[in-house]
């Protein structure tokens, strides 16, 4: 099998729709690729960032049945930035509801950053529904990882962090998370929207090895900023609605399945130690450290690694087409 590492050409969805999952939330979903292929589920980051058409291009459309959706409050799902009934457990239930609606028995689960978090949480809740995992920028949402985002990244991006912290009055900078969370939940657009944009742009500025105006512009757009800022703070304050270190503690539920992680060496948002610890806890897993990459999936080496990982999974999964 020839090992491809470049993105596949752009494609359009074969079908898409809006799935009401409760009285509040309606999720955007789409399918592309081979309708009879091996199902793969793409889980976007954030939480709150949403998916983009480019994400379809990680996967061989002749081999994979590509399923993408926007999580509660994110992207094209409605209402944007909604926090009511928005927990990790709700997102796991949404994935199952989508799987059942599409008539899928098992699927490969692909997720980066928060998407890796949700991939692990979903897999540990429903191991029998997973064929394997392709992860990027592993985030286990432990307390120190959240504290690193709020404070530690200043060690590498002091200018970005200074703008992030400096947005709050000096008296509130001792607890950035709580005080941002309060502003992001203020009903006034004039209060929550500027705070969301500052939060989201801070993340975008720290996401790549070299400054990338396209990445930063995406994080600064209204829809992404509101989803990322408000929903990330919500999940951080609530410690992702799971016990401390639960994802690593429960990895034995899925460690019999194949897993490939692609991790930027200089990923400041999600330091590589989390990917390493997950790899050490998962016998037979593969970890590729991309030596010239930060966090973003669009770093050239990371992008190539993710495409190649999906190619290798064709022979790692216990499935035939």
Image: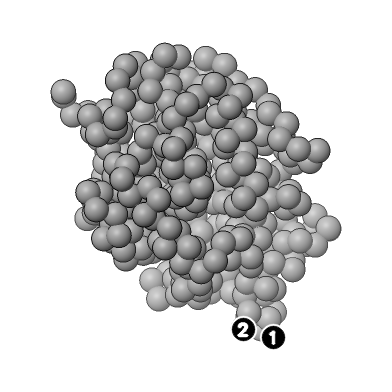
Reply above or below: 116 against 37: below
- As drawn, the residue found furthest toward the right would be 188
| Residue drawn 59% across the image and 30% down it | 98
In front of the other: 289 or 276: 276
Residue 86 at least partly seen: yes
Tell me if residue 298 comes above or below residue 319 in the rendering.
below
Between 149 and 41, the one nearer to me in the picture: 41
Q: Position of residue 183 (x, y in %)?
A: 74, 66
Quadrant of the image for the N terminus? Answer: top left
SS of the residue under disc 1: helix
How would you rate the neighbour count of disc 2 (Cα within 10 Å): few for under 14, some for 14-19, many for 20 or more? few
- Classify residue 63 as left or right of residue 192: left
| Mark 1 in CB contact with mark 2 (< 8 angstroms) | yes
**Residue at 61 percent of width and 24 percent of height:** 101
Q: Which residue is mark 2?
A: 174
Residue that mark 1 sits on: 171
113 or 98: nearer the eye?
Answer: 98
- The colouring scheme, among rainbow, by chain, secondary structure or one colour, is one colour
């Amino acid at each position: 099998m020839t090992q491809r590492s470049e993105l596949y050409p752009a494609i359009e969805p074969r079908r898409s729709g809006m799935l009401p999952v409760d009285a509040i939330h309606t999720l955007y979903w789409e399918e592309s690729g081979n309708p009879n292929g091996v199902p793969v589920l793409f889980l976007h980051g954030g939480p709150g960032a949403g998916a983009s058409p480019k994400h379809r291009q990680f996967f061989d459309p002749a081999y994979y049945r590509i399923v993408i959706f926007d999580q509660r409050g994110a992207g094209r799902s409605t209402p944007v930035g909604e926090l009511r009934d928005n927990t990790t457990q709700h997102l796991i239930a949404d994935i199952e509801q989508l799987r059942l609606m599409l008539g899928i028995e098992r699927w490969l689960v692909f997720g980066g950053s928060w998407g890796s978090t949700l991939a692990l949480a979903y897999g540990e809740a429903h191991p029998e529904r997973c064929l394997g995992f392709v992860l990027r920028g592993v985030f286990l949402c432990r307390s120190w990882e959240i504290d690193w985002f709020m404070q530690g990244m200043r060690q590498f991006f002091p200018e970005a962090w200074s703008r992030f912290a400096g947005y709050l009055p000096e008296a509130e900078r001792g607890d950035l998370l709580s005080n941002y969370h309060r502003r992001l939940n203020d009903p006034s657009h004039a209060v929550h929207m500027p705070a969301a944009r500052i939060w989201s742009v801070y993340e975008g500025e720290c996401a790549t090895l070299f400054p990338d105006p396209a990445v930063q512009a995406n994080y600064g757009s209204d829809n992404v900023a509101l989803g990322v800022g408000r929903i990330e703070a919500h999940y951080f304050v609530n410690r992702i609605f799971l016990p401390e270190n639960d994802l690593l503690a429960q990895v034995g539920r899925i460690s019999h399945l194949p897993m490939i992680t692609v991790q930027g060496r200089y990923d400041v948002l999600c330091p590589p130690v989390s990917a390493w610890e997950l790899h050490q806890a998962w016998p037979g897993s593969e970890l590729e450290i991309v030596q010239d990459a930060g966090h973003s999936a669009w770093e050239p080496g990371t992008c190539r690694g993710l495409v190649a990982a999906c190619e290798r999974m064709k022979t790692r999964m216990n499935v035939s087409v």
